[in-house]
Image (cartoon, rainbow, N blue to C red):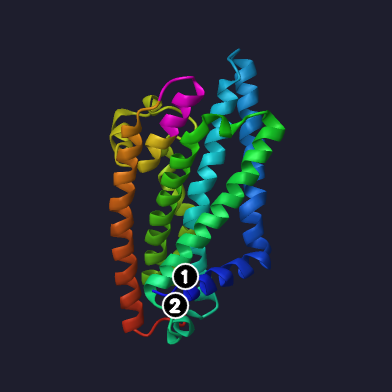
Amino acid sequence: MKIHRIFAMTLRYLFAFRHNLDRITDAFYWPTVDLVLWGLTSVYLTSSLSRTSQGVAVVVSGIVLWVVVWRGQAEVAVNVLEEFWDWNLINLFVSPLKFSEWIASFLLIGAIKAAVSFSFAMGVAYMLYDVRVFDVGAYLIPMGILLIMTGWWFGFLVAGLILRYGKKVQSFAWTLIFAIAPFSAVFYPLSVLPWWAQKISIFVPTSYIFEGMRTLISGGTLNFSTFALSFFLNIVYLCLALIFLYKSFEKIMDKGLGKGRG
C-alpha cells in the first residue's frame, strides 16, 4: 500500500467535491435544513408540553451526530457510484492503484468530509438554538469515531450492492442508511420502541451512541462498556462489509463490467 496513491485518490474526490454543487449541497445545505425543521419542531413540542429545553438539545444533538454517519456512508457509496456514471472504474485499476489503497482513500475522504459537516452543523446548532453539542466533553471523540465507523461499513455495503447490481440500485447511496435510523433511536429513547425493535437495536452500533448522548445531556454518567460493545459491532460489520465489497469488486472485474452497468 502506497501513501502517495491514497493521497492522490483522496485529492481526486476532494476536487470533485469542490466543483460539484450536489456534493456541496449534501455537506452543508441538508444539515442546515434538518436543523431548522427538526429544531423548530422540537422547540414547539417543548413549549407546548411545558418541558425543559432538554428536548431541544436531544433532538438537535441527534441531528448533528447523525450527520457523521450520513457523511461517512455517503462518501463511500456516492464516490463509487460516480465512477459508474463516468465509466471510470476500469481506468482507475489500469493504473498501479490497489484495491486497498482505493478503500483507504474512501476512509480518509469520509473522515474529512464528516468532520467538516459535523463542525458546520455544530455551529448552526449553537447559533440557532444555543445547543452546545461539545458540552458532552471528551465523550465526543469516541462518539465521533464510532459513528464514522458505522458510516464506513454501511457505505461499503451499499458500494458492494452498486458494484453487483449497477445503477438500478443507485438510490441506495442516499436512502438505505435511513433503514437503521429507527433502530438507532436518534431522536427518542429506545424504550419507546416496540419490544421487537428494541431487540434489533441491540445489534445496531449507533443505538448505543445516541442513548449515551441522551444520558449525558440529562446529566447522567456513561458506562464505557456501551462504547466497547458499539466498537465490537462496528469492527465485525466493517470486516464483513469489506469482504462483501471485495467479492463484488472481483465479480464485476471478472465479467468486464467496470465501464458501467445499467
Q: Residue 170: in sight, yes or no?
A: no
Callout 1: 10 Å neighbours few (<14), some, many (20+)? some
In the rendered image, the vertical position of residue 67 relative to residue 215, given as above or below: below
Magenta includes 219?
yes
Residue at 47% x, 69% y is: 80
Comes first in the chain, label 1 or label 2: 1
- The answer to whether residue 9 is magenta is no
Instruction: Determine the residue positioned at 40% across, 49% down.
Output: 150
Residue 261: which disc? 2
Q: Can residue 26 be seen in this view?
A: yes
Residue 101 appears left or right of 137: left
Q: Position of residue 33 (x, y in %)?
A: 66, 43
Quadrant of the drawing holding the N terminus: bottom left
- Against 112, residue 198 (above or below) is above
Q: Which residue is drawn at 47% across and 25% down?
A: 216
Label 1's element?
Answer: helix
Q: Name the residue under label 1.
A: 167
Between 238 and 203, the one nearer to me in the picture: 238
Residues in magenta, as a range: 210-221
Q: In which quarter of the image is residue 40?
A: top right
Q: CA gap, disc 1 to disc 2?
A: 6 Å
Percent position of residue 41, x then y: 63, 29
Instruction: Kindly identify the amino acid type of the residue bearing the numbered disc 1.
Output: Lys
Are the two marked residues, 1 and 2, in contact with CB atoms closer than 8 angstroms?
yes
- Tell which of 33 and 150 is nearer to you: 150
Report x, y in % for residue 205: 36, 42
Q: Residue at x 37, y 71 (%)?
A: 100
The kind of residue on which mark 2 rests is Arg
Q: How crowded is mark 2: few (under 14 residues within 10 Å), some or many (20 or more)?
A: some
Q: Position of residue 96 (x, y in %)?
A: 43, 84
